[in-house]
Image (spheres, rainbow, N blue to C red):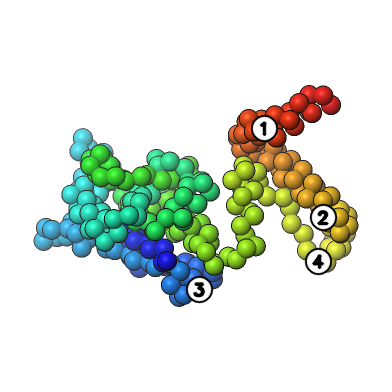
Amino acid sequence: MTFAAQILTLYPEMFPGPLGTSLAGRALGEGTWSCDPIQIRDFATDKHKSVDDTPAGGGAGMVMRADVLARAVDDAMTRQPDAPVLAMTPRGEPLTQALVREIATGPGVTILCGRFEGMDERLFEARPIREVSIGDYILSGGETAAIVLLDACIRLLPGVMGAASSGDEESFESGLLEYPHYTRPNDWEGRTIPQVLRSGDHAKIAAWRQAMAEDHTRLRRPDLWERHSDVRDQSPSGAQRQTKEKRA
Ligand code: ADE
């Protein structure tokens, strides 16, 4: 079944953009996913086709109008009633691999891309829209954030990556960063590939990779490490491990 992406935007020409190349581009050509950019301005009703207005209470910039956005969202929901509606905003819930997986296993997604200072708050009160952020920084609009979200979803669709990738996400979902990778030549500028990776001992290699993933996570992302440790300590095998650690 095709994963159907509808993107509500003032810049439909930004899509599929980079998603028209490489793996996502091939999947688009094969019909694994579809990309429907929809011009928000088409839902404006006044003669100037205005989609924004000055902020109530004063201040800089412009605010996207609730009435215009709601018409665009309603139209998209009529076409795809079962797809979740997301709005890309810097104040949204953080995009995680778990959320990506949740969306990718559904029938598709409708994504509303904001521009200017933001969208009239009443839109979020009146429509079932989930706000999503791709990080604590401000983009010039939601379109690039939508591309990030779609890229992460598309690579998970059946047949897009093949079996090779499925393990990565599982390791990320378990809350660890990836272990380091190496390839030939064995000696590069006097640096060699760790001996264990050339040992052919798969159990040893797996243990080394797990230890490296844990070290990297602990040193680079203490926030992820803390969460990972909590989850591990609550699982039956984690409880066992903790007892062993205490014994050691
Ligand atoms: N729009 C502007 N900044 C954004 C962000 N960080 N995430 C999602 N949408 C945005």
Q: CA distance from mark 1 to mark 2?
A: 25 Å
Q: CA distance from mark 1 to mark 3?
A: 43 Å
Q: CA distance from mark 2 to mark 4?
A: 19 Å
Where does residue 36 sit, x and y in percent of width and height? 34, 66
Circles 3 and 4: CB distance less than 8 Å?
A: no
Mark 1: amino acid: Pro
SS class, disc 2: helix
Q: Mark 2 sits on what residue?
A: 202
Who comes first in sequence, dot 2 or dot 4?
A: 4
Q: Does the rendering let one see residue 69?
A: yes
Q: CA distance from mark 1 to mark 4?
A: 40 Å
Circles 2 and 3: CB distance less than 8 Å?
A: no
Instruction: Please say if 126 is above or below 103.
Output: above
Q: Mark 3 sits on what residue?
A: 26
Residue, x 43% and y 45% (percent of image)? 133
Q: Residue furthest front?
A: 236
SS class, disc 1: helix
Q: Mark 1 sits on what residue?
A: 236
Where does residue 112 sit, x and y in percent of width and height? 33, 53
Q: Nearer the viewer, mark 1 or mark 3?
A: 1
